[in-house]
Image: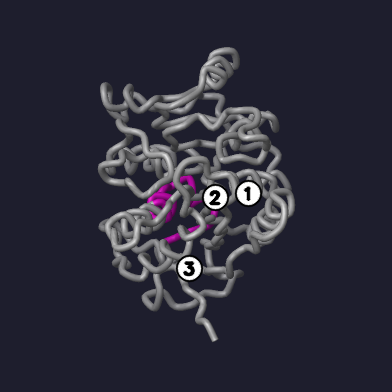
Amino acid sequence: MTTQLLFHGDDVNPTPPDMALFHVIPVPYEKTVSYEGGTMDGPKTIMEASCQLELFDGKSIPARHGIHTFADVDCSGSAEDVMLRIKDAVADCLALNKIPVVLGGEHTVTVGIVDGLLEKYDEFGVIQFDAHADLRHSYQGTLFSHACVMKRIFDHRIPFYQLGTRSYSHEEHLLRLENKTPYLDAETIHKHGVDAFSLPPDFPDKVFVTFDIDGLDPSIMPATGTPVPGGLTWYQAMWLIEKIMESRVCIGFDVVEFAPIPGFHSASFTVAQLVYNMMGYLTRSEVNMDYFGLDEGFL
């Protein structure tokens, strides 16, 4: 009998779903990766690496607020079938007023997550960390490609903001210009720092953060299908996340496109630390503490 992996392993007491703030949902989905594969192994490897994390993240203990890890979402069948299962898993989490933390898998999984969010929230925005715009209408014959995920969000008329982008087709470039898509490319962040970032005043009060790990520079994150030079440094990413959490209610987040390299443990540990740090920035944010009813004594 196989023992289910838990995020953060034995360091965190198993927390029932109704008591855990964070619901970790692994989705080992990979069907449209167009260069190098391996993202189906991402969730399992992230979970294994998370067992080596310290509970104290340098500022607080995010796990104090409870982490419940679910079994993998079934990724067999058509893309539409898988997106529906992701939607249902997210909707179940939101029904308990908890925060879905989805571990991909390729970036397509975000389509199912957003469908689940739309079941509960009338208005929210999406903030995307990514090397790529992912705004192609279709790619390699399918609408459900990792290269099309933000176009599906655009089609829902959901506001979004792109961070760290530096690789996009002419089609995507024109769509961003024509629709005045707000973004801060990686080069601008390197030139002017994270202080150059602020969400538009009319951006929704609630946000979902999708973090494609190729948004990070390949020097610290080579374990992804399409690495692009010139990405975000570790602390640039952390400070951008902190700014987001301090100004908006985060209703969930995902980390996607991690393709583990056998024996290269630093990449696995980096992604696990990223996930845990995002939990930490959320639980230390006054706006999120107020919204989710958190306090120092919670769990």
Q: Nearer the viewer, residue 16 or 174?
A: 174
Q: Residues within 10 Å of mark 2 (few under 14, many from 20)?
A: many
Read off the residue under disc 1: 113
Helix, strand or loop under label 3 = loop
Which circle's residue, 3 or 1, is located before the other in the chain?
A: 3
Res. 66 mark? 3
Secondary structure type for disc 1: helix
- Residue neighbourhood size for the residue with mark 1, other residues' Cα within 10 Å, grouped as few (<14), some (14–19), many (≥20): many
Amino acid type, callout 1: Ile
Nearer the observer, disc 1 or disc 2?
1
Could you tell me residue 271's position as x and y percent? Answer: 37, 54
- The image's mark for residue 252 is 2
Q: Earlier in the sequence, mark 1 or mark 2?
A: 1
The reply to whether the magenta stretch includes residue 272 is no
Left or right: residue 32 compared with residue 50: right
Q: Which residues are magenta?
A: 278-295
Q: Mark 1 and 2 residues: CB-CB less than 8 Å, in contact?
A: yes
Q: Residue at x 62, y 58 (%)?
A: 97
Where does residue 10 sit, x and y in percent of width and height?
39, 78
Number of the front mark, 3 or 1: 1
Locate residue 278, reporting x and y percent. 41, 51
User: In the figure, 109 relative to 266: above or below?
Assistant: above
Residues under labels 3 and 1: Cα distance?
Answer: 21 Å
Q: As rendered, which of 99 and 294 lies closer to the eye?
A: 99
Q: Is residue 137 left or right of residue 46?
A: right
Q: Position of residue 233 (x, y in %)?
A: 28, 39
